[in-house]
Amino acid sequence: MRWLIVSGDQVLASADSFLFEQATFESLTAGIHGVALKVGQIELDDQCCDCYCWFIESADSIARLASGFQFYSLRSFLLRQSDVAFQLLGASVQLGYWLKDHQFCGRCAQTLSMREDDRALYCSSCDHRHYPRLSPCVIMLVTQGNRCLLAVHKRAPAPIFTALAGFVEAGETLEQAVAREVLEEVGVKVSHCEYVGSQPWPFPGQLMIGFIVQAASDQPTIDLQDDEISEARWFNFDQLPELIPPAQTLSGQLIRHFVQRCQKA
């Protein structure tokens, strides 16, 4: 068994690891109130190990006591952990927010308790179970021949060119969401929606579903419709901008998948 210690989107780690053995965990959390929950498994020394998370309200309560330990933001682990490790970290932070945001039943306002036989918060008053909520998002690389459309979002900390994305609305298929979002953001109609892959994205609780789509016309004109996008341009596959998403992200994977396909053509 191993333990993670999480507060909000902050994960406690030492220079060696963010996973703690039982004795270390007990010394770090002695006298500190928290909630424990099993979050998954990870392979350590060729053995499958159960991982539990201890959710606490304040990171300061441990930071003052534990020399050599520090809380790091979840996003800081993205480029320096394996996919399996980052998924475990992401699940921990997501479940922590779920516990914090669902202390009371949305139907009758009674206090919820954790089920022992299910990952669910239970209301004994109205017999209702509350499960962790995910927000499905489509992310799509729009292509036309050997070109792809990349955009810069206004909220991005750096002018990084990335694929378009948006939330799926109630009553939509994934394909309908793709077509709507592209039209709303850049004014381009698309066709031939091809599923590529998916990625949990715990910022704070999305599931990204990735597609490569084709522009419906041979000469698609970009017409920015969404005030969240500052710039959008067409790029040849061999002349991409310097700043694109890393391969650890689904957006980066879509771009690289398209480039490899064009190189093989």
Image (cartoon, helix red, strand yellow):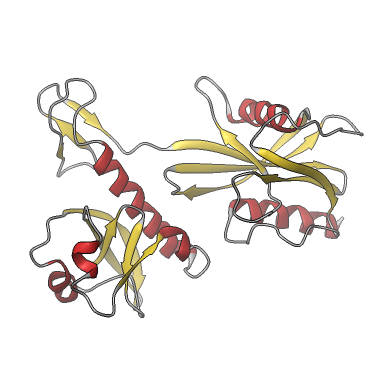
Give residue 78's position: percent from left, percent from top. Answer: 49, 62
Does residue 1 appear anywhere in the picture? no
Image-quadrant location for residue 183? top right
Q: Nearer the viewer, residue 181 or 83?
A: 181
Q: Residue sitting at 68 percent across and 54 percent down? A: 160
Does residue 118 appear anywhere in the picture? yes
Q: Is residue 90 above or below residue 189?
A: below
In the picture as drawn, the residue positioned furthest to the left comes out as 31
Q: Is residue 179 above or below residue 261?
A: above
Q: Residue sitting at 21 percent across and 55 percent down? A: 56
Give residue 92's position: percent from left, percent from top. Answer: 32, 54
Q: Is residue 225 above or below residue 165?
A: above
Give residue 40's position: percent from left, percent from top. Answer: 31, 57
Give the left or right position of residue 66, taking residue 140 as reference: left
- For the C terminus, the quadrant is bottom right
Give residue 47's position: percent from left, percent from top. Answer: 31, 73
Give the left or right position of residue 214, taking residue 162 as reference: right
Q: Nearer the viewer, residue 3 or 5?
A: 5
- For the N terminus, the quadrant is bottom left
Image-quadrant location for residue 64? bottom left
In the picture as drawn, the residue positioned furthest to the right comes out as 219
Give the left or right position of residue 186, taking residue 110 as reference: right
